[in-house]
Amino acid sequence: MTIAQVQAVQSPSFSEVVQGRRSVRSYDPTFQISKEDMTELLQEALRAPSSSNVQPWRFLVIDSQELKEKLLPIANNQKQIVEASAVIAVLGDTEGYKLVETIVNRSYEAGFMPESMKDTFMNNTIKMYSSLPPEVAHRIIYTDGGLVSMQLMLAAKARGYDTVPMGGYNAEKFVEAFGIGERYLPIMLIAVGKAAQEGRQSVRLTVDEVANWNEFTL
Amino acid sequence: MTIAQVQAVQSPSFSEVVQGRRSVRSYDPTFQISKEDMTELLQEALRAPSSSNVQPWRFLVIDSQELKEKLLPIANNQKQIVEASAVIAVLGDTEGYKLVETIVNRSYEAGFMPESMKDTFMNNTIKMYSSLPPEVAHRIIYTDGGLVSMQLMLAAKARGYDTVPMGGYNAEKFVEAFGIGERYLPIMLIAVGKAAQEGRQSVRLTVDEVANWNEFTL
């Protein structure tokens, strides 16, 4: 069996992962996710798609207890900050186009992009993404940030961990305290760890309440 | 076995779904996803988390051939628009707070929220989300839109369908042609259907290139 096949066999079913994921706010403070395991988790999350495959997402994995304590008051003293194994800050890089050359060259070298496309695609993408009006660039970055964050939370659940996405923190204080440069947009914080208590169940609007077929009448 | 257990057994592994998902641009034009199946797919996608569980996402499922033809020139004549079984427009509702009362009441009735929390949570959420500066509200909506879109694409793959997310369309012409009110922000179009040809593989930046531990030096 290939590594991918072994992983597939060991992995829980997609449905179990999606239905089992809840926002968990209580974690076992003694449990630590290893750097190796966290790297694999991020690697799976990174398979998310992004606009023109620019992958403008960046991550700061905060797993030092000292730094989690520093983050605590900045994130409204939510106890999962210090109890979870790590808090992952999902950031968006407004200069993500600077890695397009790396991505396109690697794609060409892997045989995924024909030579005929390579230079045109690279030049057009860099030209476009470096000159977008900020509000358009930000819209793309927040959307792509949402895509990768969802896959990250599911990838964590598939490994037996739980998560909670957090928007309730002081972004200005956060970037200052953690030395995040101006080119990066804070998208969300995600606590990840071993649950000490199950997350509360939560309701959803029905498909009828949020979707129409062919004619939009919401 | 409960329905959830039966689904779990039939569902492919999480890892297979994530590793198997690629952006597919060539679809079998004769294959139609039934409304029932599409509803189940959306229902699973909707389990995504959102800021304060406001669920500001809305969807227009375009599966009439006539309307797909109408959309084609608006979406740069990408052939997946007319070949895929459906194109799902993911929209964000800037007045999503109008459904907060419904969500909170339903949550209370289901026993997921204690009575002591209900009114305070409802009032605070409505007050906050109805008075956010537009750029903050939009940031949340695009991020939540990304979360649900990712889960939607994975839920499609778990059912044997493929998808491609599209940002390359004229949003102004789209909202005009499909009668989408000003309160809705177009987030992306997602084509979904039965693949006629595999998607191209694509590379990703490595974890080292996009993530730091504890100290941000990217």
Image (cartoon, coloured by chain):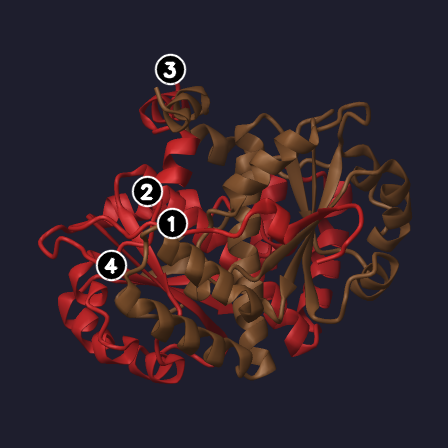
Chain colours: A brown, B red
User: Residue at left 70%, top 28%?
Assistant: A34
For residue A202, say whether it is visible: no
Residue closest to the eye, B35 or B103: B35
> Mark 3 or mark 2: which comes first in sequence?
3
**Residue A181, position as x, y percentages in the image:** 77, 67
Farthest top residue? B1
Q: Is residue A169 left or right of residue A118?
A: right
Q: Residues within 10 Å of mark 2 (few under 14, many from 20)?
A: many
> Mark 1 or mark 3: which comes first in sequence?
3
Please tell me whether mark 3 sits on a helix, a strand or a loop.
loop
Mark 2 to mark 4 CA distance (whole Å)? 14 Å
User: Residue at left 33%, top 45%?
Assistant: B156
Asked if labels 1 and 2 share a chain, the reply is yes
Q: Are marks 1 and 2 in contact (CB under 8 Å)?
A: yes
Q: Which residue is mark 1?
A: B153
Q: Are marks 2 and 4 in contact (CB under 8 Å)?
A: no
Mark 3 — on which chain does it sit?
Answer: B
Please tell me whether mark 2 sits on a helix, a strand or a loop.
helix
Vertical position of residue B90 compared to residue B11: above or below: below
Vertical position of residue B84 compared to residue B34: above or below: below
Vertical position of residue B110 compared to residue B147: above or below: above
User: Residue A33 is drawn in which quadrant?
Assistant: top right
Q: Which residue is mark 4?
A: B25
**Residue B149, position as x, y percentages in the image:** 44, 55
Tell me, for residue B1, which label it has, or none: 3
Q: Which residue is mark 2?
A: B157
Q: Are marks 3 and 4 in contact (CB under 8 Å)?
A: no
**Residue B175, position as x, y percentages in the image:** 37, 79
Mark 1 to mark 2 CA distance (whole Å)? 6 Å
Q: Residues within 10 Å of mark 4 (few under 14, many from 20)?
A: many
